[in-house]
Structures are given as C-alpha cells and as structure tokens.
Image: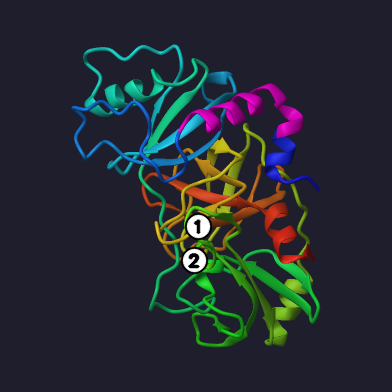
C-alpha cells in the first residue's frame, strides 16, 4: 500500500508540485518563518512547524505551518483579506503569506508535544501510552505504539494493573535521530501475556491511507472515540524537541482528538480503516498522527 505522501502525489500532483516548490523557497523546518514583521512580538513570531496539504474552504492548498504562542489553530487562506479589526496574530500570519506564492495557506498553531506521561502508570515502558494496532512479528503477534513511549529495546510493557504485557522489540523516535532529521515515531511490543496475545490475534484491522477530506477517530487510553476532520496531510512536522528529529509522513487534525497518555493510539478514518497512530499534539488545539504504511515499512512489519 502507498504511504500518505505517495498517495497524495498520485491524487494531487499539481498541488504537491506547489508544495515542493514552497519547501524550496522558505527556510527549513525549525527556522523562523519568512515575512515576520520587525514589529512582531516574541509572543507571536514562531518557527516553521511543517508543510502539508490543507482542504479548507472546499479547495486543496499547499500549506505552511508556523508556530504561534496560542493554544489554538489560526488559518489564513489565500485570497481572504485581513481587516483592520483582525487580531495581531492574523495580521502577522498575513505578513508571512505575503512573502510566499499566492496559493499558499498559512496555518498558525502551537508547537506539538509528545503525549506520553512520564512517571505515571505505564502501558509501554516510558509512561502512560496506548496500545496500538496488532502486527505480525517474528515471534508471533505484537502491537504498535509510539516510539517515544518505549525508551529502549527490551523495556517491559505493563498495563495499568501492573500486569506484564510484553517487551519492546523495536523502537525509534525523534530522539533517535539527528536534529531536524525526519523519521518515524514507532515501537513494537511483542506479547509475553497469553491473554493479550489471544485478544490481539483475534483483531481484524483493515489498512487505509488518509485523504484530505477524512474524518478521523483516535482510540486512545485517555480520550477514546474523539473525532475530527483533518487540517493538513502529508509532508514533515516539527518534532517536540530541538534536540531531536521531526515527524515524517504526518497529518494534523482540525481539533484535538488525543491527550497525554494517548501516544500510540490507533487512528481510523470514517470507513473504519486504520490510517495511522497518534504521536503528538496539543491539548485543546490539535493532534498529530503518523501514517501507518510508513510506520510499518520503517519497522519491516505488516498488520495482523
């Protein structure tokens, strides 16, 4: 199956060409966005969080995502004027947009965070996280979770009742690579517990690839069953720390469908197809999921 970005290149070749052109014209992820006015305060001027495709207002646009110090999402679409009554953040986003090609949407949002709770009751090694989709491993059946929730190979994974689930056999996250390098945030836990092994072996999961019009739902340990339209799909998203890498093949929701403790949660579209797993977000603003086909390819595995 094609990854998220590969699928977009087939379905929207012109828009992806515009996105590729955009990424060559602006500074890299983690750098300050071009066009921030000299008068802008440090509160509003932020770094480039990522690039993607956005389906807002019934049309597909290449989008530049920039950091703002507000716990919400602000969107400046091309062709929509900013009035004198608009707030300072919107005027600043318009200033960025003026420096870029005319078909580019500007999306302001707070920097994403990992959503594992360090030191709380554990699901997957480094704190409270969520058991994701079942996968076939060399040893039988296991499951996917977020790599940042599983700190090292061999780490024990427990449920909230302190029952051993299994052991981490593979892990990779933004912490595993050089700063700004795009990567997968994924881990695999192989079952030691027969009850969990049998439960997961009976799971029936169909794979899908996200599209720009999807409504997606996360099955997290904390906020199970919350849904949202997608805000952007494809490309790279700034990681949670400047000391590490960025999320590759990611998507962002219009509103948050996850909270701390939901990292690793399976994300489904409206057709009940598994399209990815939660890797980050900001409570009260949005969630970040990573494409399932990309994650599986990175691990060399398949869904059970």
**Occupied quadrant, residue 234:** top right
Q: In which quarter of the image is the C terminus?
A: bottom right
> In what element is the residue under mark 1?
loop
Name the side, left or right, on which 183 lies relative to 6: left
**Which is nearer the N-term, disc 2 or disc 1?**
2
> In what element is the residue under mark 2?
helix
List the residue tagged with mark 1. Answer: 245
Name the side, left or right, on which 298 lies relative to 119: right
In the image, the segment drawn in magenta is 9-26
Return the x and y of residue 190 as percentages of the image width and height.
69, 79
Separation of marks 2 and 1 at Cα, in angstroms: 6 Å
Q: Which of 20 and 76 is in front in this view?
A: 20
Return the x and y of residue 225 as percentages of the image width and height.
54, 53
**Occupied quadrant, residue 8:** top right
Q: Which residue is drawn at 69% across and 82% down?
A: 191
Q: In this view, does 98 lie above or below 227?
A: above
Q: Is residue 143 above or below residue 169?
A: above
Q: Residue at x 62, y 47 (%)?
A: 249
Return the x and y of residue 111 as percentages of the image width and height.
38, 48
Return the x and y of residue 2 as percentages of the image width and height.
78, 45
Structural crowding at the residue carrying mark 1, measured as other residues with C-alpha within 10 Å and reported as few (<14), some (14–19) or many (≥20): many
Name the side, left or right, on which 57 lies relative to 282: right
List the residue tagged with mark 2. Answer: 175
Q: In this view, does 191 lie above or below 203?
A: below
The secondary structure that dominates the magenta segment is helix
């Amino acid at each position: 199956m094609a990854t998220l970005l590969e699928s977009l290149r087939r379905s929207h070749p012109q828009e992806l060409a515009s996105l590729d052109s955009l990424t060559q014209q602006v500074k890299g992820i983690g750098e300050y966005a071009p066009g921030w006015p000299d008068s802008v305060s440090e509160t509003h001027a932020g770094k480039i969080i990522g690039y993607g495709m956005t389906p807002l207002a019934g049309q597909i646009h290449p989008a530049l995502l920039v950091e703002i110090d507000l716990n919400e999402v602000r969107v400046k679409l091309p062709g929509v004027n900013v009035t004198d009554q608009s707030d300072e953040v919107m005027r600043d986003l318009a200033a960025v947009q003026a420096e870029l090609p005319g078909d580019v949407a500007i999306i302001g949002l707070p920097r994403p965070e990992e959503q594992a709770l360090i030191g709380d009751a554990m699901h997957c090694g480094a704190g409270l996280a969520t058991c994701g989709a079942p996968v076939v491993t060399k040893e039988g059946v296991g499951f996917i979770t977020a790599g940042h929730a599983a700190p090292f190979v061999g780490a024990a994974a427990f449920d909230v009742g302190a029952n051993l689930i299994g052991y981490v056999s593979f892990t990779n996250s933004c912490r595993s690579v050089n700063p700004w390098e795009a990567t997968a945030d994924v881990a695999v836990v192989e079952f030691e517990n027969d009850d969990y092994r049998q439960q997961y072996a009976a799971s029936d999961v169909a794979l899908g690839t996200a599209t720009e019009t999807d409504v997606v739902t996360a099955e997290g340990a904390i906020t199970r069953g919350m849904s949202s339209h997608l805000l952007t799909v494809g490309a790279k998203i700034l990681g949670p720390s400047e000391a590490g890498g960025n999320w590759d093949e990611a998507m962002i929701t219009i509103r948050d469908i996850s909270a701390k403790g939901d990292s690793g949660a399976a994300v489904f579209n409206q057709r009940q197809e598994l399209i990815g797993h939660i890797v980050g977000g900001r409570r009260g603003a949005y969630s970040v999921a990573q494409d399932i086909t990309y994650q599986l390819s990175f691990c060399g595995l398949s869904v059970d």
